[in-house]
Amino acid sequence: MTRANVLALCMVVLVLGMIMEETEGQEWCHDYMTGKQKCEAQHCAAQCKRKWKGVGRCMPSSTQCLCTFKCNY
């Protein structure tokens, strides 16, 4: 291999290693919050954003709010 090919291969390995480090550990967590009344979308979204800095969605025909957020281990 020529010196240029070896250098290019090293650069590819370096870039891939940097990308893997950025995405490693960014898993999604979930939390169910249950209220006394039927879930309201705006309230659910605001509650999840405030508590977890995540996204909240109401479960269909339920009092439960499902929060999805990035886990920080």
Image (cartoon, rainbow, N blue to C red):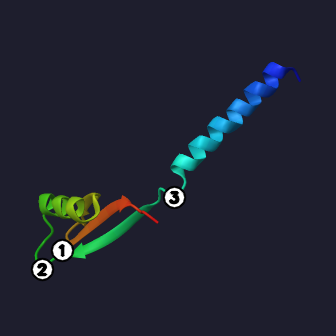
Q: CA distance from mark 2 to mark 1?
A: 7 Å
Q: Give the residue furthest to the right.
A: 1
Residue at the location (20% across, 61% down)? 50
Residue at the location (52% across, 47% down)? 22
Left or right: 67 in relation to 72: left
Q: x, y percentage for residue 30?
A: 36, 67
Image: 39 above or below 2? below
Mark 3, Cα crowd under 10 Å, few <14 / some 14-19 / many 20+, is few
Q: Amino acid at mark 3?
A: Gly
Mark 2 secondary-structure assignment = loop
Q: Give the residue furthest to the left.
A: 37
Q: Amino acid at mark 1?
A: Thr
Q: x, y percentage for residue 2?
A: 87, 20
Q: Residue 47 occupies which quadrant of the picture?
A: bottom left
Q: x, y percentage for residue 34?
A: 21, 77
Q: Mark 3 = which residue?
A: 25
